Image (cartoon, coloured by chain):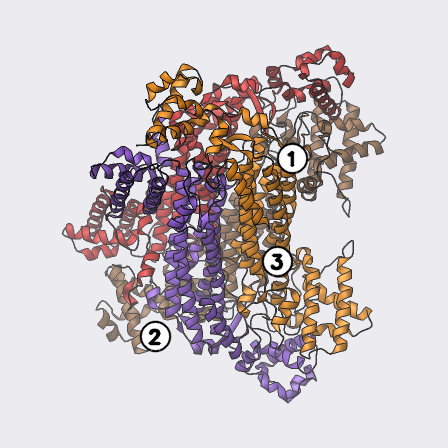
Chain colours: A brown, B red, C orange, D purple
Amino acid sequence: VKLWGGRFRKPTAPELEKLGQSIEFDRRLGLLDVRINRAYVAELRAIGLVDAAEEELITRGLTLVEEKLSASPPPKLNDEDIHTAVERLLGEAIVELGGDPSVAGKLPTGRSRNDLAASEFRLYLASAIESAVAHLLRLQRSLLDRAKTTRDELLPGYTHLRRGQPVVFAQYLLAYFWAIDRDRARFRAARGRCLSLPLGAGALAGNPFPVDRGRLAKTLGFEGVSPNSIDAVSSRDFALEFLSAAALLGTNLSRMSEDLILWASAEFGFITIDESYATGSSLMPQKQNPDGLELVRGKTGRLVGNLMSLLTTVKGLPTGYQRDLQEDKEPVFDTVDTLELVLPVMDGIVRTLGVRSDAMRAALSHDLLATDLAEHLVRKGVPFRETHEIAGRVLSLAAEKGVTPPELSLEELRQVSDAFDESVSSVWDFRASVEHRATEGGVAAKAIAQQIERAESALS
Amino acid sequence: VKLWGGRFRKPTAPELEKLGQSIEFDRRLGLLDVRINRAYVAELRAIGLVDAAEEELITRGLTLVEEKLSASPPPKLNDEDIHTAVERLLGEAIVELGGDPSVAGKLPTGRSRNDLAASEFRLYLASAIESAVAHLLRLQRSLLDRAKTTRDELLPGYTHLRRGQPVVFAQYLLAYFWAIDRDRARFRAARGRCLSLPLGAGALAGNPFPVDRGRLAKTLGFEGVSPNSIDAVSSRDFALEFLSAAALLGTNLSRMSEDLILWASAEFGFITIDESYATGSSLMPQKQNPDGLELVRGKTGRLVGNLMSLLTTVKGLPTGYQRDLQEDKEPVFDTVDTLELVLPVMDGIVRTLGVRSDAMRAALSHDLLATDLAEHLVRKGVPFRETHEIAGRVLSLAAEKGVTPPELSLEELRQVSDAFDESVSSVWDFRASVEHRATEGGVAAKAIAQQIERAESALS
Amino acid sequence: VKLWGGRFRKPTAPELEKLGQSIEFDRRLGLLDVRINRAYVAELRAIGLVDAAEEELITRGLTLVEEKLSASPPPKLNDEDIHTAVERLLGEAIVELGGDPSVAGKLPTGRSRNDLAASEFRLYLASAIESAVAHLLRLQRSLLDRAKTTRDELLPGYTHLRRGQPVVFAQYLLAYFWAIDRDRARFRAARGRCLSLPLGAGALAGNPFPVDRGRLAKTLGFEGVSPNSIDAVSSRDFALEFLSAAALLGTNLSRMSEDLILWASAEFGFITIDESYATGSSLMPQKQNPDGLELVRGKTGRLVGNLMSLLTTVKGLPTGYQRDLQEDKEPVFDTVDTLELVLPVMDGIVRTLGVRSDAMRAALSHDLLATDLAEHLVRKGVPFRETHEIAGRVLSLAAEKGVTPPELSLEELRQVSDAFDESVSSVWDFRASVEHRATEGGVAAKAIAQQIERAESALS
Amino acid sequence: VKLWGGRFRKPTAPELEKLGQSIEFDRRLGLLDVRINRAYVAELRAIGLVDAAEEELITRGLTLVEEKLSASPPPKLNDEDIHTAVERLLGEAIVELGGDPSVAGKLPTGRSRNDLAASEFRLYLASAIESAVAHLLRLQRSLLDRAKTTRDELLPGYTHLRRGQPVVFAQYLLAYFWAIDRDRARFRAARGRCLSLPLGAGALAGNPFPVDRGRLAKTLGFEGVSPNSIDAVSSRDFALEFLSAAALLGTNLSRMSEDLILWASAEFGFITIDESYATGSSLMPQKQNPDGLELVRGKTGRLVGNLMSLLTTVKGLPTGYQRDLQEDKEPVFDTVDTLELVLPVMDGIVRTLGVRSDAMRAALSHDLLATDLAEHLVRKGVPFRETHEIAGRVLSLAAEKGVTPPELSLEELRQVSDAFDESVSSVWDFRASVEHRATEGGVAAKAIAQQIERAESALS
């Protein structure tokens, strides 16, 4: 069965059938197809294009179709696409119900696969984003919970993968929290952009029957109707926006993964990845590999690839539905599935992360307080650019003498700068260093407490 | 002069100097660097780290620096980056003012290039987006103005680059309007995400002096302060979000360009591109090529490429500033410049577009009313799926007989289906076909009028 | 069953199981896994690590495994990956054969999944490329065949989608031929790069038993062995090279598709797409859409996306196998499948293309000879830059007078330039224009004949 | 001055002038434009379209143009593009030489900017690739030299960023060597594809005068002539192939960078980056950051972005020159420049790398010999899959007892498996482990020596 064969005298070439078939992937829209059909038949009834009996017959038929599609194992479908399949199944269902199958042929009145498919796809995506947002919220919750219990864990903060200044572990977890918070905001915006109903646009010129698009939108959970019939069937920027948001999330997840893989290495040793999120080697019996994190990081590739895929497909297309646009679904489905796979793993890893306070502490060496030393002199009125130089020279002196900086005598320090006095000893305290950074967003206990409050508000 | 040489005994390798130098591109942030410095010195004064005289000296020095940077031709700068250049120029300016240059060394107190550069970059981008949004608004205004005057121009609407149904030209222009409207919303959201102030995050752990970040944010025009010092210096998703929005806009502009190039071809002939937006051939004297549109379409490549560039750069980086992130600026600058180049051209082309009504009309053939024929029978109670088939057969019959469909006699039509009666003649009217599509978003005069109102609201 | 559970006390988290499972896609490597195992057991026998009876048992077991994997419908496999599955199935097969299943445990001696999987993947890809190359050859053959029969079909050659100069249709078909010829060369080079055997690299340090890697390579059809054990398990540039070659091919196919879609439109009308490669509309009964070509063009997106996916995945990874690299397979498989789908369709479309000579001819207007007019004067000694100007003015004059250029009198022409004489009338001949372009690669009959010869050589 | 104004009555819109101007970037092709012009005028002389005096005048004029373009500082050029500039400068030069400037107008006879620009671009790129290949060779030489002196440095080989098995440092350096070797082969292939001469294709239909394209090709250093005039001006796959090769190289360089950044960290401490390839922090006086490596890694982004940029631009274009193709140059130029910047830095870093043998050795712990333990039992006839399990249990036992595996008594070992005997003590030797891996490509001294020989051959 085809929905369009009327004027064709030749059969479709088998290689085109194969190339064009979308049922393998668009079957996941089946139940939404039924749902939209159900709303649409009610609308046809409202404007008198089907009568009460026909509406009931079609509606009952759709319920049967829904059951068939939901069966386990799922039915084999060899149709061109899911819309064709549902139309065929509806005809069969109506026969089963003892009705006239031609009634099924009233359903597509005034409608095209263009506006139908776009509506289903948007509905699907809005709901998939909702699920992703819920996963993101869970991950944020886990990060915040772990941040609350790690606000006293001192460790080096890194730039350029080199130890920079002492921070607390919570500050890293909260950094992730805020990145994910922005991702969540982008997902929500993308979802809003999905919820504009194309149905009623027909193939491109609108519906010639007085269906009430606003009512359809309401029934189906859309926030409004698309304002222009051509735009409704042509535009895919809603899908691109989702793919972008997911690719950006991917880069944030890749950063978290990279950190955790490093910190859990033998060389850093700051954290442990729970065994349930690691795997072993088929060759090397001693191995415990952080596969969960590696997979999360690696899947950034497909999130970016899916975005590039659809950007490339739509580039250069003229307006109006072009068959190229059939290529919109697989990248979106793959990105949706990827999010569903990676977010729970990341959440589980965060929840079960082991914190090795001693190793963190042990990585703090006194040169990490060089900035504090410089700032100590700033408080005595020396311009920072000079104190930065002085602190550098102090480190060199200590290195020369083979001692740690605190082991230098006041005399030795005063050879570098006479601004030093006995108060310098107060500098060599990692906790004090952290407590100095009390401005909003800083690592001092007070600032962290405020930040945690702000984070709680973001979740509520 | 370097801001970090203290502990280094060897000079930087010349090839690294070349690789690492950013002054060629980040000099465009010079005036913003000055502006932020000005706000920062006031803050240092407020917390007593500089006194009134020092503040005045630095502020006057910054004014001199500003003048130097604004000179024409611009000054040669061989510094490592713009922050180094401004710090050097400030020292020189203070000497010019008869002051002690070491005072300049107080300015960077508690601050790192990490939070300074991120603040400048965000401020720059927010303002660049504002400009892009203004361009988009102008383009929307032009599209809407042209739509108002072309609502009666009938032409074929296309799908698959094949004539589908009669529409009005305004509907295409409005389709572009709405696509750009969504682009504008995405740009605004990206701008909002820029306006979170990193300054005060230091290198990564926060500012050890009690600067008031909220006040700094206000003075500088930010909407708030970044909540986490590590996130503040690590995250670049604000830039990626802008690049995404621009890449999506690029695909929308490429679609408009493609349409207009096609319609302005000899083969379509629906519109004319004003000569001022065309160019000729160095070889073929007769040529008038739509170069403006081709360049707009072609530049989609760099918009997508710039996004891919930064996505790739940040992928896999650990948290904290990494020097890789210096690569954030050029793609953003290039995308900003590209938007400034292409949007005025697209706007000019739309404003000066010639509409060839006769050619549009001439492209309407009766087979474009096949859907109307099918729908005519629907109104008589025949299920659409059957009427679709019937209409197909009518076209085949006309083709066989070598006549247009309206030339078929009622008798001939009734051979195909006895649902036909004399009222069928009303079908063969292009304007009537358009008027049938009166649902919201459709092409009927009434629907177009409503849509134009909705568009006006979107602009206000 | 897992190949690595020895030291683990906790079960793998179910969400990691799901995320990490590769059996769904790597099962397509099953028969290659068997084939490599068969060669490997022979090698183990050669160095005395299995005895003759064990070798026979394993080999017979592998044959059973092969049968199971080839069964239709294919067996359910819930293992972690295909290597695990084959090892499990081998154990079961040996039991079926009455043997000791622990013998199966001798097979992975000295080997890791790292070198095994890389070997399979390379073997798979080399064979997939071979198939793609065969498709490309077929397409080239079709293009060349069609070129031979269309060397006299005059039509406008286009630049900027504007008519430029008269050419023959064969020249377009041959342009495609040469583009595909370069694609084919790139595929062949990529294939060569696949055929370097990783097996023997172990996990990363090499095989501790004296297996003869050269013999293994020969048995398995590789061209050589990888020279470095770390490189062997880390590098994926062979896959990236294939994905690049396919993305480039995609852009060439998208260009062909774009041309053919345009030329087959009502507005151009130069060619017809065979009905068997077109489809209709579910709404508009008159439609015959060039879906085959649109799908080919649209699939460029996924070819590019797959490349970007893997580029992003490998970016920033350290050396050595990382689990991220599991993401190498799906983009490659998808690109392989896409090529298998699109190339036969493109070939079919080329083979069945209808050529509408009259429409092609009708699109030739005299302004396309403006260049010839300029060149006519060049032959009389006038510098080209002037003749270009003169020809432009002739066209303007004709336009003013409302005549075609040939209709201008000699007197009128001489008002523009006194270099004109009666010989100018010879210019207005489309065929003559084509015949002038007789340099190698040009459109004159002689040049086309030479080109066709060169093309024939390229295929042999 | 424009090369195409004849038929235009309106001036070009200023915003299109700005958008379309390419002189800022294509001026780098100026000397090649002159070189091609010089060859072309000789050809025009050979076929009698210019006489000996004209040829001399033009040739002397071109020499003047060359001097002007080579001046320092370079001349301001406000022309549309470099071809226009050279044609204008040639006219001016001929006036300076006392000649008739209209003679300059004979130069573009039979030629279009389409075939001229494509020829220059290919020539430019072939030479740029040659330079990149030389850089790659130098880098390979440095890697090989360093490999020769580090073949006895034992360190852990990593997979999943976890210690796997003992290897020698040279094996890592050689792994890089081979990856770069493949990159070099890809560059060479791309260069070959550049060297097909478009000149003679005209705008698209060929040259109407009997120029000898083969002779032109020879004079200019091309390997042959493009076989098809339309293909010659349309195709950009030669540029895409280069961009692909460079993107792939980028991923290889990013891997090297990642390794070296990690190994040079305080936590690994295996190597030192020479101070001349590091930079400091403007805030933290103690910092020595591996900026050189970070920049190399970060620039992978633009290499990939440039590829994506041009792939997107060409996607969906019809055949023939389209103005979109002007966008081919900037990504290529940027990639060329990037290679020139990063390769010398990478080479310098490799040449000056410090090796910290003690730290490398110290990272070898006995669990890295777990595989050797398993293989030890294999040699006694126990199937590997069992020995893998046994070795895992030995490690667990040692962990339980709080000892290293070699500290377990034979009795304790025999509790795990009675296959153990006294020979087990030979297992606990890192050097012996390495020496076992003596198959081709392995880490044993003999295998490394062979590999180094193979590498030397690759360079000669």
Task: Tell me the distance, in whole angstroms, between the alpha carbons under discs 3 and 1.
Answer: 39 Å
Q: Give residue A117's mark.
A: 1
Task: Tell whether label 2 touches label 1 (CB within 8 Å).
Answer: no
Q: Nearer the viewer, residue A130 or C335?
A: C335
**Is B143 positioned to the left or the right of C345 in the image?**
left
Labels 1 and 2 positioned on one and the same chain: yes
Please tell me which residue is depicted at 56% across the width and 18% down the height of the picture. B362
* Residue furthest to the bottom: D422
Numbered label tally:
3
Residue D85 figure quarter: top left
Number of the front mark, 3 or 2: 3
Which residue is under mark 2? A404
Q: What quarter of the picture does the N terminus of chain C occupy?
A: bottom right
Secondary structure under tag 2 reads: loop
Regarding residue A1, the answer to whether it shows in the image is yes
**Quadrant of residue A165 within the rendered picture:** bottom left
Of residues A15 and A343, the one drawn nearer to the viewer in this rendering: A15
Report in which chain the residue with disc 2 lies. A
User: How far across and how far down the image is residue D120, in percent?
Assistant: 38, 45
Farthest residue toward the top?
A: B422
Asked if labels 3 and 2 share a chain, the reply is no
The chain carrying label 3 is C
Residue flagged by tag 1: what amino acid is it?
Ala
Q: Are marks 3 and 1 on the same chain?
A: no
Q: Is residue D252 above or below residue B170?
A: below
In this rendering, the answer to whether B95 lies above or below B397 is below
